Image (spheres, rainbow, N blue to C red):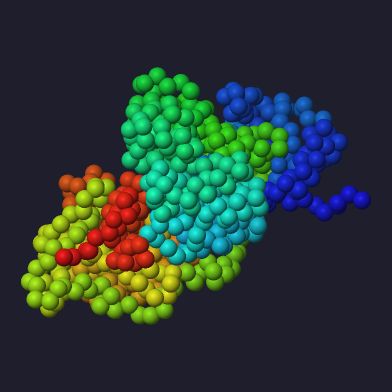
Amino acid sequence: MKDQTPPTDALINAADEVKIRQNLVRVALGHAPADTRLRVGRMLDVHSRMWLTDQEIILSGRRIAYVGPAGSYPGTVAHDVHEPDLMAVPGFGEVHKHIESSHVTPEWEAALVLPHGNTWTCEASHEFSNVDGPNNLAFWFAARLAGSPQKIFPLPGSAVPPTAYEWGGGYFGYDEQHSFMADNLMVAGLDEVMDWPAVWNPENPSYERLWGMIEATFQHRGVVEGHAAGIKDLPTISAFAAAGLASDHEAWTSEEVLDKLRRGLFMELRPHSVQDMIKGLLEAGLSDWSQFALTTDDRSCSDTLKLGATDHNVRLAIQAGLAPEIAIQMVTINPARHMRLTPWVGSIAPGRFGDIVLLDDLESLSIRKVWADGELVAEAGKYLKPVPKIDWPDWATRTVNIQREMTADDFAIPAEPGRETMTAALLRPFHWHDAFIEMELPVVDGQVQRDADRNVTKFAIVDRFSGAGKTSRMFWLGTGPKTPDTALACSMGHDKHNIWVVGSSDAAMAQAVNALREIQGGWALVRGGAVVATVRYEVGGLMTCRAPAELDAEMQALYAEGAKIEWMYEPTFSPRWFPGFPERLAFATLTCAPWRWVLVAPSERAPEGFVNVATGQTHPIIW
């Protein structure tokens, strides 16, 4: 007897997929009734980049069963919707995005971006996976299973941990990746391989782990995403491509893009440089854009509320001179092909999910309505469905594990007895140099001191996974508060996401970390002995289960308090670093290429936390 269990496609699995497609065949032929006919004035066929007039899209459940000229469908439908004045394009996809960087949980992020046309996302999953690797896929599938119409295709993180000098929260190697790829068709591949020294150097302690993940991905015909920051010379680009790393989203100039494109890399262009790159590529005569996608990568919900989502990226590309149809291909069929997801997303075609963006103006990419999973989900910028209520379990909401009160002594740097000064190793944000900075600093009451007059402050990393609150600390240049008794702490510190804290006094640093311990992650700002602002990221220490507007209000209050503080900065060392609230310190804790010297939580290979991740060399922080 045939299995009569009704199939579900909230998540894609092979057994249910066969049942779904068997039904779609009958609907397409008119042998079974369809649910909805959506008739539109024009429709973009992204496969040919041609506009078709007066088309009907036949929907069955969450999927498209038939597409053709109006009146050509041979079957019956339960509901008719006619939009003669609107243009249909496929639902927009993100080829590479960290949903965690929105700082709201996936069900809330979906409600935020669906009105902007973003119906599917390839989640670059090494943020939450570094916090809780064992529950990573359960986390990303929870919103979909609860009813969210956005499709999330997770790519488990290669950077779990980011380097061999970091630990805690998760560990992914061959066995884990093999299981991820085998268990669910939604898993598209391996997230951006960032530890380039571990890929090319067999003596690197992460070499076997990374190549094991790459092997498991190849075995399941998945995509190995790349991260080629700082890789610009042709031999290294060639080695990167030869390793099987299929893409890069870190290029900054059109010349760099062409060098990588010509070595076979799929190029993912980010908003901060996309207009200059597109203009340069057009001037260079590029005509084939099939190896390109537009990608958001990281964007907070506050910025999405102001700028938009994937639609913002498309508008930037159009403004740079790209034809709207090509720009739309770069967020639909191109990323779907690259990620080998074309059976489900990327075009308005039979078998795909019923994800359709209805435009009332092409040049401005004005979105009137958005359909997802075969139904209308957004209109005039408003999300129409209820946001699923998810009671996130303790494994998601109890991730700041520090089983003691932090004290000022945790951040003190004792001097050698009898010394009046000591030499200190210094870093500054985005210090991509082979050598660290050295500076002579004063000793007072047996402790090495900051020097505000020379823009020297103290920076620390506190482990939030072991319970012990292990702390590494050192001096940094050109960042943090100059205002006395002030500290800023955050549990979002790419990519290991331990707590980082910067401050003008050790007591304020301890107070800020303790505040995060209480609220289970987020931001904490201390001034004059008081916690003057907090922002709660109670899910993974990275996100909050709240409406984006509520989170944005907390962020604006944090910025307002931050504006009352004098912040150090060095205007000469980086064009990307600006005075004011140092939010970008959340990215200054990265350990991937092109970083060399970094500060990580104390580990067996780096007891003080100060290590060159390219060579494995360690060094005292004072001498």
Residue 355, x across and y down, in percent: 63, 41
Which is more toward the observer, 621 or 533?
621
Image label count: 0
Which is more toward the observer, 404 or 224?
224
When the figure is inspected, residue 156 is found, relative to residue 131, above or below; the finding is: above
Residue 15, x across and y down, in percent: 76, 48
- Quadrant holding the C terminus: bottom left
Of all residues shown, which one is farthest toward the right?
Answer: 1
Taking the image as drawn, is residue 119 in sight?
no
Taking the image as drawn, is residue 201 in sight?
yes
Q: Give left or right: position of 377 versus 602.
A: right
Q: Quadrant of residue 51?
A: top right
Q: Quadrant of residue 137?
A: bottom right
When the figure is inspected, residue 567 is found, relative to residue 513, above or below; the finding is: above
Q: Give left or right: position of 201 versus 208.
A: left
When the figure is inspected, residue 6 is found, relative to residue 71, above or below; the finding is: below
Residue 386, x across and y down, in percent: 61, 58
Identity of the residue drawn at 21% across and 53% down: 436
Q: Quadrant of residue 106?
A: bottom right
Q: Give left or right: position of 504 versus 168.
A: left
Identity of the residue drawn at 35% across and 38% down: 231
Q: Give left or right: position of 449 versus 194.
A: left
Of all residues shown, which one is farthest toward the front?
Answer: 203
When the figure is inspected, residue 25 is found, relative to residue 185, above or below; the finding is: above
Identity of the residue drawn at 41% across and 79% down: 403
Residue 375, x across and y down, in percent: 67, 45
Identity of the residue drawn at 28% across and 75% down: 410
Which is more toward the observer, 472 or 536?
472
